Amino acid sequence: MGMGRDGGGNKDGHVPAVDVTVVGVDVGARRSVVAFVGVWAKLLNDLAVVYARQNGVSLVPLGIYDAMTRAYVVEVNYPGVDRYRGNELTSSIISKALGAVVRAVHSVQRVHNALVGLAFEDLRLFNERKRDLAKARVVWELIVNRFGEVVSKCPAVKTSWFWISYRGGEVVVPVRDFIPIVLVEPEYTSSMCPRCGAYLGRARGGKVTCSYCGFEGDRDVIGAMNVALRGFLILVKCVREGVIGVARELRGSAHRLFS
Ligand SMILES: [Zn+2]
């Protein structure tokens, strides 16, 4: 499947007027992995790492860059929510790490007039592959609740549009601080090769190698990349159908949703 500004095979050949970049987050019980894909992926990655350091937390670059997926990947670790004071610490670390990502997004939006979205799995949906789903979900709620105040719907996304069919109805696109938040279908996010789309099996933990294309990564990394890629496809589709876009007259200062 084509990626990038002119990928995706739209019938009328319409090209979105804006650059799309997406930050995908695989939320785990004690570790979250963040993948940056799209036009400004590298810049966002670099800025987020620096801003996190300024906030006193570590977004650790995992040194994974793949020419096909064009994803940059970092991780953040925290104690989790089941230890003494773990909840407080975890909340604080996540808040600082996420704050760094949001600041990076704002910088890129301001300077380049680009559309940058955040993508998360929709953990309100059943997801059997998560080992520590209940714990991960507590962390996920910490994150998503920060953004969940304003909710819009993107009616452009309704049907099979992914490597695997998208079961759900509408995709929820909450918007906070002018950053669209895309909640993607959680099914198979950690069991499909982010480079070639091959099924990687249900085995858990550790490093996985795709037997078709040779891509290597652990499940969280694969999850984050797939979340980012799915979010990317959704945002591009919303942009193409005019559901979401950059308000040109407010160039440099704001994005808005219109529908
Ligand atoms: Zn592969």
Image (spheres, rainbow, N blue to C red):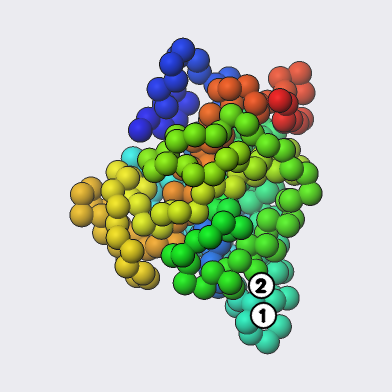
Q: Residue at x 57, y 40 (%)?
A: 169
Whether residue 96 is visible: no
Q: Write the residue at 71% across / 83% down.
A: 85
**Residue shown at the point (21%, 49%) measured from the top left:** 212
Query: Residue 199 at x, y = what percent?
Result: 30, 52
Indicate the secondary structure of the residue bearing disc 1: helix
Label 1 amino acid? Gly
Q: Nearer the viewer, residue 38 or 110?
A: 38
For the C terminus, the quadrant is: top right
Question: Identity of the amino acid at label 2?
Answer: Thr
Q: CA distance from mark 2 to mark 1?
A: 6 Å
Label 2 sits on residue: 90
User: Quick check: marks 2 and 1 in contact, CB under 8 Å?
Assistant: yes
Q: Nearer the viewer, residue 152 or 116?
A: 152
**Residue count near mark 2 (Cα–Cα under 10 Å), binned few <14, some 14–19, many ≥20:** many
**Label 2 residue SS:** helix
Q: Which mark is residue 86?
A: 1
Direction bottom: furthest residue:
84
Q: Is residue 36 left or right of residue 243?
A: left
Residue 140, relative to residue 231: is it above or below? Answer: below
Q: Is residue 140 left or right of residue 145?
A: left
Measured as percent of width and height from the top left, residue 143 is found at: 67, 59
Front residue of this view, candidates 131 and 22: 131
Residue placed farthest to the left in the image? 211
**Residue 121, position in %: x, y?**
55, 53
Q: Residue 211: x and y, percent?
A: 20, 54
Q: Determine if the C-beta at disc 1 is less than 8 A from ligand 1.
A: no
Q: Quadrant of residue 179?
A: top right
Q: Residue at x 73, y 51 (%)?
A: 147
Which quadrant holds the N terminus? top left
Quarter of image, res 29: bottom right
* Residue 78 in view here: yes
